[in-house]
Image: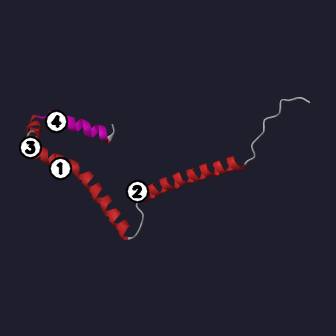
Amino acid sequence: MSLKKSLVKQGMKLMTDPRVMKLMQDPRVMKAVMTAMSVPGKVQSFGNEQVEKIAKAMALATEDEVNDLKRTVRSLEEEVARLRKEREDRNSPKKQPPSSGTR
């Protein structure tokens, strides 16, 4: 059995225990549980903010800025390709349809 399945199974057993059910009805306990559950997200956000601050202090581009630049370069390359094709179409001699007249 995987660790996750084992933990879920044990958690379900605990939730059916009357002592745990009574404890979970206490608003203070629920508030503490919710706070504990939000900690990983807060830590992640704080870490990302600190990385961005360091990157700006060192004049480095962040991942978002690099992705924005890649999109800009891609769109400019597509525009250049389109303009080259238009130029080639204008400069290429037009094919004349074969004459259907007989001599």
Q: Position of residue 36 (x, y in %)?
A: 19, 50
Magenta stretch mostly in which secondary structure?
A: helix
Residue 55 located left or right of residue 17: right
Q: CA distance from mark 2 to mark 3?
A: 40 Å
Distance CA(mark 1)–CA(mark 3): 12 Å
Q: Residue at x 48, y 53 (%)?
A: 71
12 part of magenta stretch:
yes
Please identify the quadrant where the N terminus is shown: top left
Question: Which mark is in front, 4 or 1?
Answer: 1
Judge left or right: residue 89 versus residue 35.
right
Label of residue 64 in the image: 2
Quadrant in the picture for residue 5? top left
Which badge, 1 or 3, is on the more N-terminal residue?
3
Q: Circle 4 sits on which residue?
A: 15
Residue annotated with mark 1 = 35
Q: Earlier in the sequence, mark 2 or mark 1?
A: 1
According to the picture, the residue beneath numbered tag 3 turns out to be: 27
Residue 80's mark? none
Q: Which residues are magenta?
A: 4-17
The nearer-to-camera label among 2 and 3 is 2
Sort mark 1 into few (<14), some (14-19) or many (20+) by Cα contacts within 10 Å: few
Q: Amino acid at mark 4?
A: Met
Q: Which of labels 2 and 1 is toward the front?
A: 2
Q: Can residue 14 be found in the magenta stretch?
A: yes
Q: Earlier in the sequence, mark 4 or mark 1?
A: 4
